[in-house]
Image (tube, helix red, strand yellow):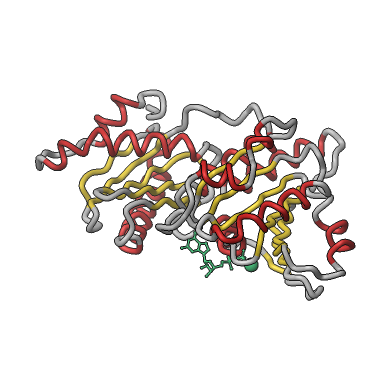
Amino acid sequence: MSFLRRLISADRKKAQEGEQAKQHVAIIGLDAAGKTTIMKRILRSEYTLSKPTFGVNIEVYRYRTLEFVVWDLGGHAPIRKTLWKKFVTKASVIVFVVDAADQKRFHLAKEVFYESLANTDPNAPILFLANKSDKEEAASTLEVMEALELHKMTRGERPFNLFRCSALTGEGLFTAWDWLVDVVSKDSSIPTWHVKIYAAAIFDANAKELDHAIFGNPTQQAKIANAYRESIKETERFAKQMRDYNEAVTVLEIMNDFQLVITKNKLFVMGILIDVNDPVSRVLTISSRIFESIEMDYLKGHQISLEKVISNYFPLDAIS
Ligand SMILES: Nc1nc2c(ncn2[C@@H]2O[C@H](COP(=O)(O)OP(=O)(O)O)[C@@H](O)[C@H]2O)c(=O)[nH]1
Ligand SMILES: [Mg+2]
């Protein structure tokens, strides 16, 4: 996944500058908040998991030079303090996950959140995830902010951001991780605004293809064509899998050099193939704009031209 690669490349840079070449990411929150589900969604199958039996539920995922420690908070195991030192105090990034639908435990989540912060590196960025946004009873971003008094975090010194997300549908999750990677890597070689779109394909809600477009330069055509074929298959698969959801998103790595960002709304499912190092959040903006702009034509039964709409609205993202 590109998020992970970008984190690793940030590590390599630090290693060259003589700093420690390992990133520790702590994923914390109450039990059942969705931490394990989120990690599996982000890491997919490319990690090793060791599950230490310390009497506290901790999972350690390793992906190359990255170490993710997933920690269920809220229990009062006496062993917690020493373990905390061992794992979480050295974390260079903190991800706090709250179940936005579990409003009864907001108070406890708040207590645990501030208690944990006291023991982390005061400069470590914090990504706050209000998970399970797909649930009807999930609190809004504002409600979560108020219940957990997060306004003071936004005025603090350390980088802080809050995203509403769903580990189930992927909505919001990848934008959140993009933010995290940008904050951690501060790598100026990463384009933050435009991406390179190599290809795109759009399907209707019943997984029937409506149109596709291939961009990219001719010397790379064969490779792009292969990646494109794989993208079509994956997009179609996702369209079928997510048929019952009005909003969904996922990101898949394709043939090492590409990533496929698939977004779905009520009417469409679209896969956009971009460079593996490009920021996913930009593609989410592009997708929603495309959906908006083609909706009327589609409902009137007109032919949709992805090539036209992408090169009209996002000329700098469609490479030639
Ligand atoms: N509807 C919904 N359920 C979720 C979401 N994320 C996790 N879950 C479910 O919530 C339960 C607890 O998730 P888990 O990842 O084990 O939580 P953890 O204890 O924080 O690791 C599981 O049944 C998950 O399937 C989500 O975004 N939406
Ligand atoms: Mg878990």
Location of the C terminus by quadrant is top left
What residue is drawn where x is 35% and y is 38%?
288
The answer to whether residue 129 is above or below residue 195 is below
The answer to whether residue 108 is above or below residue 287 is below
Percent x, y of residue 78:
86, 69
Quadrant of the rendered image holding ligand 2: bottom right
Percent x, y of residue 98:
60, 55
What residue is drawn where x is 36% and y is 40%?
199
Which of 104/187 is in front?
104
What residue is drawn where x is 30% and y is 62%?
244
Residue 90 relative to residue 176: left or right: right
What residue is drawn where x is 55% and y is 29%?
191
Q: From this viewpoint, which residue is outermost toward the right?
A: 82
Residue 217 relative to residue 111: left or right: left
Percent x, y of residue 89:
84, 51
Q: Would you say residue 294 is visible in this rendering?
A: yes
Q: Would you say residue 254 is visible in this rendering?
A: no
Residue 303 relative to residue 105: left or right: left
Percent x, y of residue 181:
63, 40
- The picture quadrant where one finds residue 237 is bottom left
Residue 41 relative to residue 67: left or right: left
